[in-house]
Image (cartoon, grey):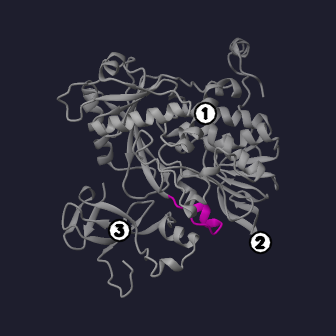
Amino acid sequence: MLQISCPFCGDRAESEFSYGGEAGIARPSDPDALSDAQWADYLFMRKNPRGKHRELWNHAQGCRRWFEVERDTVTYAISASRKLARRDNHNR
Amino acid sequence: MKKYSALSLLTNALSQNRNWSEAWRSPEPKRQYDVVIVGGGGHGLATAYYLAKEHGVRNIAVLEKGWIGGGNTGRNTTIVRSNYLWTESSLLYEKSLKLWEGLSQDLNYNVMFSQRGVYNLGHSLQDMRDIERRVGANRLNGIDAEVVTTEQIKLAVPLINTSPRSRYPILGASLQRRAGVARHDAVAWGFARAADALGVDIIQQCEVTGINRDGGRVSGIQTTRGTINTNKVGVVVAGNASVLAGMAGLRMPIESHPLQALVSEPMKPVLDTVIMSNAVHGYISQSDKGELVIGAGIDAYTGYGQRGSFQTIEHTLEAIIELFPMFSRVRMLRQWGGIVDICPDACPIISRTSVDGLYFNCGWGTGGFKATPGSGWTFAHTIARDEPHELNAPFELRRFETGALIDEHGAAAVAH
């Protein structure tokens, strides 16, 4: 089981969290302008890297807030955990 | 290839079994092949076999970075069935099941395919409605399926807990009698031996490090044992599909997750069929060695580590003990993980790509073993003809652009 550091609550067991997949996928600001291939890329295509991965977790059984974790997908070691950056556009 | 038979067993026994020849050669890679298959698991070896057998391609290499069958082929719970909900997937898996039924004879290798039946349990009214719908859909597609009652289950599997007072009472099940299990290692070895006999070069300890392209076409691949020129590359690498796709500048709708399984100490025969439960998420059968073979769900996070979390196993064993209280005292012998390639619609990708001559077969997720022969058969057709067979045409990558997804999440008798 992973030990995940919630930036709001501190270190907790993985079973308190739910996984949200790849972080930093920005919703296109004008979906109508996209081709089907571009929309499919946004909806379905993932980096799925072997190594460092930026991903979203939700502290479902705690503060219920989303945050970002940097984790190695081979060693499973977590190298960083941070609050989501606030941006001006539609990015998460 | 020396044919295996009762006579060959006898003559080799007379010479103290010292004269068996190797089941397949270990050749040095050539500089050029007509087709290179990346990935020496069951699906890759089956692809090479059917390319040689059905399409007459002779100059084929299968490259494997470890040893053949050392990935998910040797790590799964060996269940074979075809009771999927949607027509596209049930026809694909049924093609595979039909190939399974003649596979030992076809390969001249005993893959120990045992059609002992598979029960998919229902624990709620909604489960039973879904089961009736799926059984009806299967029968319309010519696939054997039936709905059985709690009493029929208890009669067939006396150990199972059918108490109406249990946390998840068993209200009934679907049963596919032609489904069952096969010996996974034998599947890899049988396909390897039969492919080798048709001239396929199986090259182990050979990792692909790059895919060469010339214009929009594949021109060769780079490996840890040198560069190989070829115009056709078929990639069948399960959990590593995104990594290989990246070498050709492609993106895949795949996320790789750890999936675990475990076996108990060997016991006298107690369970002669396969029991699967979607709601409590466990599946169990007993191997010919007597071990209980138990499969878990995937870990929530993505990972390539070929191991998973204890809480996932704990969750599965809670379900198994709920169903079979007497197994609470059985000791578990070992547990392991494999890396499965999960697709958004829980269906595979058997497809051409935007790079000419580059084909991908991936996205089988948690249920690829049952499809081994059918996957190889359709992928071989796709590579040889440069177009999909009608069975795998719905499973091309373009479905993610057209929106024609085949949603088997939860519909395919188990949650993926």
Position of B87 with respect to A73 (left or right) is: right
Residue corresponding to mark 2: B215
Whether residue A13 appears in magenta in the rendering, the answer is no
Q: Residues within 10 Å of mark 1 (few under 14, many from 20)?
A: many
Q: Nearer the viewer, residue B153 or B272?
A: B153
Q: Nearer the viewer, residue A62 or B162?
A: B162
State how far apart marks 2 and 3 are (Cα): 38 Å
Q: Say if residue B252 shows up in the picture.
A: no
| Figure check: B187 above or below A1 | above
Residue range in magenta is: B243-254
Q: Say if residue B201 shows up in the picture.
A: yes
Query: Label 1 sits on what residue type?
Result: Val
Residue corresponding to mark 1: B187
Whether residue B250 appears in magenta in the rendering, the answer is yes
Q: Nearer the viewer, residue A76 or B137?
A: B137
Q: Chain of mark 1?
A: B
Q: Chain of mark 3?
A: A
